[in-house]
Amino acid sequence: MSYTLGEFERAVLLAVARLDDNAYGMRIRQELESRLKRTVSIGAVYTTLDRMQDKGFVSSRLGEPTAERGGRAKKFFKVEAPGIKALEHSRDVATALWAMLPARR
Amino acid sequence: MSKKWRRERSQYGEIAAELKVQRERELDFAKLSFEERYGADLARRLREQQRYLKGVRVSDRWSRSHDLRNFSEVLNEIMRLRDQERNPLRWSEYLLYIVLPKEERESVPGDLLEEYRTVILPRFGVHLARVWFVKQVVASIWPFLKRRLLKAAGLAALLRLLH
């Protein structure tokens, strides 16, 4: 099983992990926009989450429908064990790459 | 005819005659005008009061119903505009539905609508909020379409391998 993550995938996975029980589309998008300081479309978030769900990094469940959503249900996401492993792997790779740089005087 | 019977008949006759007179008096009283019944001054005051109460009640009823009609019309208009504002442009929602996979048709429009209503609309107003919604839809078309095409291509490749 490959634990490689793209840059956006890592950001989405970290946002889901950070939001914990409140991780659903709108919150994840807002979190990403505020952290990455750029516009993020809801489509990009959902397709990334869908892809990671296929890989087993995240799981989803449907919540209760609410009035402000026009009676539509929320889809909550949760990071699974392979997702945490992928994040750790991504951090290790980044650390190893940074270690390659010569120390500055 | 005994003495007793004659006395009784005359008694009943007296009572009947008294009742008849009383009834006639009542009928006469009913025929009397206000002036004749209560005197000219009291009758005038009663008539004035009657006219005033009648007028007030009628005009009040009319004005109240007129006001209510206006109020409900204004209220309906406000509600209609509020509903219109609270929802993004319909065609943009349709556009999103076309590209969305079946399993995301609940959550994605819900997320956009929630953010539109709770965050964007109160902060930026109707026009900018609608622009934001359309921008989100347009930006979301390509990722969903790409995902769909990739899935279809993957499926086609798999079928080709099996054959």
Image: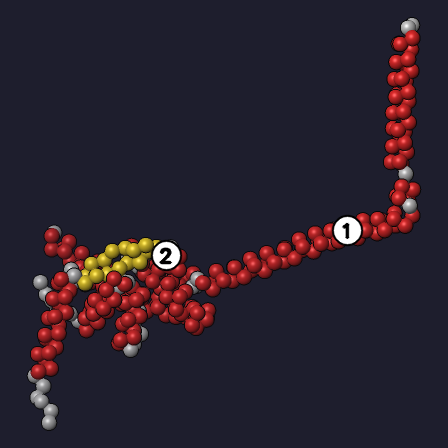
Instruction: Say if residue B146 shows up in the picture.
Output: no
Relative image position of residue B161 (x, y in whole percent): 11, 55
Residue extending farthest bottom: A105
Q: Are marks 2 and 1 in contact (CB under 8 Å)?
A: no
Instruction: Say if residue B132 shows up in the picture.
Output: yes
Left or right: where does residue B66 sit relative to residue B44? left
Quarter occupied by the N terminus of chain A:
bottom left
Q: Which chain does the residue under circle 2 lie in?
A: A
Relative image position of residue B3 (x, y in whole percent): 92, 8
Relative image position of residue A64 (x, y in whole percent): 32, 54
Q: Is residue A63 above or below residue B24?
A: below
Give the residue type that dot 2 points to: Thr
Circle 1 crowding by C-alpha within 10 Å: few under 14, some 14–19, many from 20? few
Q: Kindly indicate the quadrant of the structure image that contains residue B111.
A: bottom left
Q: Secondary structure at mark 1?
A: helix
Circle 2 crowding by C-alpha within 10 Å: few under 14, some 14–19, many from 20? few
Residue, x 7% and y 83% (percent of image)? A100
Rounded to the nearest whole Å, what is the CA distance between mark 2 and mark 1?
Answer: 53 Å
Quarter occupied by the C terminus of chain A:
bottom left
Residue, x 31% and y 58% (percent of image)? A74
Relative image position of residue B67 (x, y in whole percent): 65, 57
Residue, x 27% and y 63% (percent of image)? A22
| Residue for badge 1 | B53
Label for residue A66? 2
Left or right: where does residue B103 sit relative to residue A1? right
Q: Kindly indicate the quadrant of the structure image that contains residue A25.
A: bottom left
Residue, x 23% and y 64% (percent of image)? A20
What is the image's colouring? secondary structure
Q: Kindly indicate the quadrant of the structure image that contains residue A73.
A: bottom left
